[in-house]
Image (cartoon, rainbow, N blue to C red):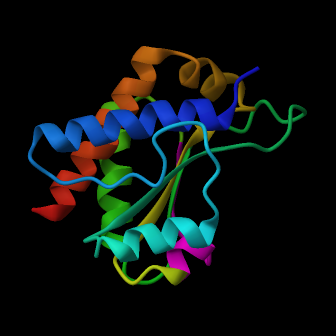
Amino acid sequence: GLREKDVVLAITQGVARELQKQGIGVTMTRNSDVFVSLQGRVNRAEAVNGTIFVSIHANSIGLSRPEVNGVETYYYQTGRSLAQSIHRSVLQRLNVRDRSVKRARFYVLRKSSMPSTLVEVGFVTGSQDSRNLANARFRQQMAEAIAAGIVQYLK
């Protein structure tokens, strides 16, 4: 019953609120339950001449693998230090499994011109992560941790 799109939208809106409180401009690729293509996401970031691009997701591996839990953060080329800053912030603030920072060729990472990262906030199929992600307070803490990592990177 836990859907990635609901979990991620709540976290992403929380990240935006936290950054805006600190005077950081935020452009969202979506503010409601609408689908935006990968190219549409990149186009939006490019159109506003974004400084960074942060894509937030929740992982899934299938209900037969509930033992798989944890946070992963990806970068392609220029986003490594951004990914590391966000990942470190999440691990410092939340009790989650560390699945590390990894290099990947995800479309949004390859096609955006600014430093980019993709954060997997946990597994909706994981026994521990699904409990956490279903909790509104945990989602807010995740949002605050991601925002803090972004602020640290921008400094």
The answer to whether 28 appears left or right of 149 in the picture is right
91 within the magenta span: no
Residue 105 shown in magenta: yes
Rendered position, 151 above or below 38? above
Q: Is residue 50 left or right of residue 94?
A: left
Quarter of the image with the N terminus in it: top right
Please tell me in which quadrant of the rendered image residue 148 appears.
top left
35 above or below 14? below
Q: Is residue 73 above or below residue 108?
A: above
Q: Position of residue 64 (x, y in %)?
A: 90, 33
The foreground one among 47 and 11 is: 47
- Identify the residue at image location x=9%, y=47%: 23
- Residue 118 appears in view: yes
**Left/right of residue 8 with respect to residue 142 in the rendered view:** right
Q: Quadrant of residue 83?
A: bottom left
* Magenta residues (range): 98-110
Q: Residue at x 52, y 82 (%)?
A: 111
Residue at 51%, 15% (x, y): give it.
Answer: 135
Visible in this render: residue 75?
no
For the residue pair 100 and 32, the one nearer the viewer reads as: 32
